Image (tube, helix red, strand yellow):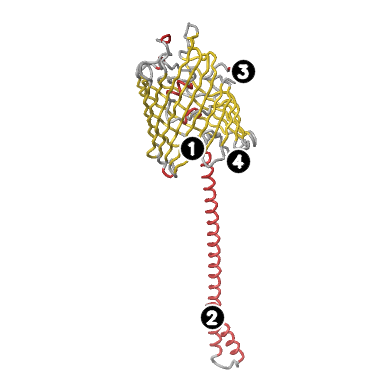
Amino acid sequence: MKIRKIHVLLAMAMTASSNLSAQPESSPDIAVLRQEIQQMRNEYETRIADLESRLDAAEKVAMQAEASAQTAQEQAQQASQLAVESSQQAAAPALDSTASSISVSPDNSFNPSIGVIFQGQAWAFANDPEEHSIPGFPLGGEAGLPSEGFSLGETEINIAANVDDKFTAKLTVPIAVEDGEVEVELEEAWVETLRLPAGLSLRMGRFFSEIGYLNSVHAHAWDFADQPLAYDAFLGGQFLDDGLQMRWLAPTDFYLQLGAELLRGDHYPAAGAGNSGMGAWSLNAKTGGDIGFSNSWLAGLSYLAAESEERPSGDEDDPLLFNGDSELWIADFLWKWAPNGNSRERNFKLQGEYLYRTEDGEYALPGSDYSPWDENQQGWYVQAVFQPFAQWRFGARVDTLSGDVPGDQWLDTALYPMGSDPRRYSLMVDWSNSEFSRLRLQYNRDESGLQDDDQFGLQYIYSIGAHGAHSF
């Protein structure tokens, strides 16, 4: 409106100027009036130019503000959509304890991701760990106490990548030092399908069996530095073998996964690759869900059948040998709590498993013939881990074994149990500077052997390179 008024005044001034110009120049005031009008016109033109430039600037600022607001709204919508998609993707596999640990970006999906995990430890025992045994439960496989003093433990090398659009693969090679010699082992070497229909997946090669909960968890992801007594006695620490693994994820609103494995039968509790190299098989079912925003749970039931041909256990130099069938049932349960699902600051985990084993066959004691063996044994553990604030966790565990008392022919042998059930109590505290490092201090009150033992352990776990997310 101001600009229009100025234009009108300027037009009037110009009209007046033209009228004055038309009058005779002899008037003495004409020159003065003409100068004043010219001065007014110059001032108005200057003010008009200034107002127009300010108007243009204001319009540009308004347009920029509108564009910025629109861009911010679009970015907010995109961020919200990404958050929803991320939460959906995180919720779906959160309970999939058998999902592949390979995580490869789309732009680098066919290039191997390589990671190394360093695990060192130092242990002190009240008794000689070389003489450790659990009467009635001769240990086999990788079970047993760690070396006393400082030791390197296992250095684990992981290599994983997509083979193509339909298969992915993983290799895990632990390097350990035993009796002063470096030993390289092949822990995992498998290929898995990516795009089978109807929620099916197939894994082929060497892998940790999906029985129970802890069996498929790698050592660096354990909440304690060692396995429960039942895992040592019944699975040789952890059960892995060569074969096929099929899983089916049910299309249900709640989490439900069924699995089956056909295995070679070359590793404890199997031995000898019986039945033409198909000496073990297993079934498992897992289900779980969320309760509100802060709680989630997982439960499972597993069965393992294994054939054994001269399965060694006990003293490595003069072992017991078992021929026969071994059957193992495992029921597991896990409860997790984190405020509003955010476990970074505070969280709590309650975990337990019950294992029941039946073995029917024959045992041979060192230097003697085979004798019939048909016994039932069981074991369980319960553990709780609490993180009250970031980086620090505190845990407690109790685990035990029990079983039938065999006949008097087994008296004074490794197969005859003590008067009381083997039991152990554990406490631990660990500190993690980041998700790639952890220091842990652990104490065990071990009442599973012939003499009670106080055990103190210090452990470090460090990871470099790529490493997939852990299962639920």
Q: Which residue is mark 2?
A: 5
Circles 3, 4 touching at the beta carbon (< 8 Å): no
Q: Secondary structure at mark 1?
A: strand
How far is the residue under mark 1 from the one under mark 4?
30 Å
How far is the residue under mark 1 from the one under mark 3?
37 Å
Q: Which label's residue is closer to the chain start, 3 or 2?
A: 2
Q: Which label's residue is closer to the chain start, 1 or 3?
A: 3
How far is the residue under mark 3 from the one under mark 4?
42 Å
Quick check: 176 above or below 310? below
Q: Secondary structure at mark 4?
A: helix
Q: Which residue is mark 3?
A: 276
Q: Which label's residue is closer to the chain start, 3 or 4?
A: 4
Q: Which residue is mark 1?
A: 288
Whole-percent x and y of residue 187?
A: 54, 24
Q: Which label's residue is closer to the chain start, 1 or 2?
A: 2
Q: Amino acid at mark 1?
A: Gly
Q: Which label's residue is closer to the chain start, 4 or 2?
A: 2
Badge 4: how crowded within 10 Å, few (<14), some, or many (20+)? few
